[in-house]
């Protein structure tokens, strides 16, 4: 109740403070080199979110005071009316700065990768301080941010999900994909098809892993999972969730290049398929299977004779960048509406929009 009390009190004062933290552009890399490709994709999402929050601010009766964390090398990124940047320099601890700023805000909207528990820890920080998260809680990230746990949860609810297990140093005929259990996008994911591929991957990644009981699993590769390399259209769903309910916003087509046994995302056609009847039943099932999900989430699919769920991303995804131009729907406004009710999703138009991207961090 603390998070709602804080928000209610701020509303009485007609000011609601919201902290936006996109990990790549917001200081997560403040002590090391900031790769251009990562900064570009993170910047796409950050700028889209800031623009849509500003737009929501102009139509809401309650004023939003928008605070954004920015890497010291990107301090001109958020130059616009209504945005208050906080520059994160090399001497800063970005996690401590995030905690400090959350204490002085009512709402927090982190966008961060799931690997190494980054997103989960940020969400936990917000919750422990009694502030309102505008994303899924840490409990949801703990499941959706782990490919094996996601598969197990969906499988228990009879939802078609790409079979996933711990990668072991044992060759199996066929084509397979090996990826980090908590990885994002296609980074560090490889297609294996020969015995030599398996042996090379095992040599690269090591051999120690722990099972669910904390026991060493001989021959397993730590923190990596293996999935069959299914053929089919690679799509994603942009959705909103709240307490076991799901709203499909749009379906998107992901286009990849395949280079050196790896997929590289080249662009996303946002709102490529207007037929909600094909996807909404799946969104409803996922909402019931993962009632912890809240706010925006992206669902990656492989489509052939079935709709196979590949993974669930409990955060903003790159597809978010094109939603307003495709549908005229302000997702930031819709997420704010979720705080006290249902989202209003009335498309002003209906057209596909292509978002150009480089796949290094965030999934689509």
Image (spheres, grey):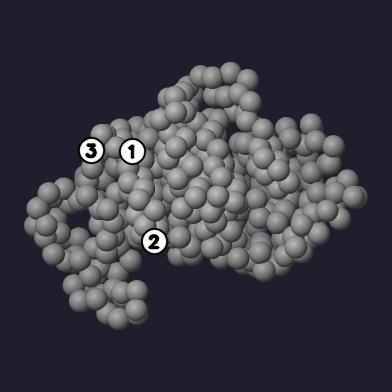
| Residue 94 sits above or below residue 324 on the image | below
Question: Relative to 294, is 277 on the left or the right?
Answer: left
Q: Residue at x 50, y 48 (%)?
A: 287
Structural crowding at the residue carrying mark 1, measured as other residues with C-alpha within 10 Å and reported as few (<14), some (14–19) or many (≥20) = many
Question: Relative to 297, is 75 on the left or the right?
Answer: right
Image x and y of residue 233, in percent = 30, 33
Whether the residues at callouts 3 and 2 have beta carbons within 8 Å, the answer is no
Q: Quadrant of residue 77?
A: top right
Q: Residue at x 57, y 24 (%)?
A: 327
Question: Relative to 7, is 275 on the left or the right?
Answer: left
Q: Tag on residue 333?
A: none
Q: Tag on residue 307?
A: 1
Whether the residues at callouts 2 and 1 have beta carbons within 8 Å, the answer is no
Q: Is residue 42 visible?
A: no
Residue topped by disc 2: 149
Q: Tag on residue 231?
A: 3
- Nearest to N terminus: mark 3 or mark 2: 2
| Residue 273 sits above or below residue 23 on the image | above
Structural crowding at the residue carrying mark 2, measured as other residues with C-alpha within 10 Å and reported as few (<14), some (14–19) or many (≥20) = some
Question: Relative to 37, is 83 on the left or the right?
Answer: right
Q: Residue at x 54, y 24 (%)?
A: 326
Give the spatial CA distance, label 2 vs label 1.
19 Å
């Amino acid at each position: 109740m603390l998070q709602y009390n804080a928000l209610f009190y701020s509303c009485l004062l007609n000011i609601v403070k919201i902290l936006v933290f996109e990990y790549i552009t917001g200081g997560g890399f403040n002590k090391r080199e900031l790769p251009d490709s990562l900064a570009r994709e993170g910047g796409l999402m950050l700028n889209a979110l800031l623009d849509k929050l500003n737009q929501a601010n102009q139509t809401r009766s309650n004023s939003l005071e928008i605070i954004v964390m920015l890497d010291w090398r990107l301090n001109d990124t958020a130059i616009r009316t209504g945005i208050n940047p906080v520059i994160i320099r090399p001497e800063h601890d970005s996690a401590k700065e995030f905690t400090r700023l959350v204490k002085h805000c009512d709402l927090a909207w982190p966008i961060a990768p799931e690997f190494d528990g980054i997103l989960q820890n940020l969400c936990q920080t917000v919750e422990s301080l009694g502030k309102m998260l505008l994303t899924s809680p840490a409990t949801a990230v703990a499941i959706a941010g782990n490919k094996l746990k996601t598969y197990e949860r969906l499988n228990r609810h009879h939802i078609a999900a790409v079979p996933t297990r711990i990668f072991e140093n044992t060759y199996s005929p066929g084509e397979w994909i090996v990826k980090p259990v908590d990885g994002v996008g296609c980074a560090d994911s490889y297609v294996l098809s020969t015995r030599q591929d398996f042996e090379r991957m095992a040599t690269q990644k090591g051999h120690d892993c722990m099972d669910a009981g904390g026991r060493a699993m001989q021959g397993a590769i730590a923190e990596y999972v293996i999935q069959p390399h299914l053929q089919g259209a690679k799509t994603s769903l942009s959705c909103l969730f709240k307490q076991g309910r799901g709203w499909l916003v749009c379906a998107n087509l992901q286009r990849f290049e395949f280079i050196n046994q790896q997929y590289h995302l080249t662009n996303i056609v946002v709102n490529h398929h207007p037929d909600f009847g094909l996807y909404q039943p799946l969104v409803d099932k996922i909402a019931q299977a993962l009632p912890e999900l809240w706010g925006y989430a992206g669902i990656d699919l492989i489509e052939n004779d079935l709709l196979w769920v590949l993974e669930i991303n409990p955060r903003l995804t790159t597809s978010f960048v094109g939603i307003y131009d495709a549908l005229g729907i302000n997702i930031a406004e819709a997420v704010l509406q979720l705080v006290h009710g249902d989202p209003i999703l009335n498309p002003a138009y209906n057209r596909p929009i292509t978002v150009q991207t480089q796949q290094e961090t965030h999934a689509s």
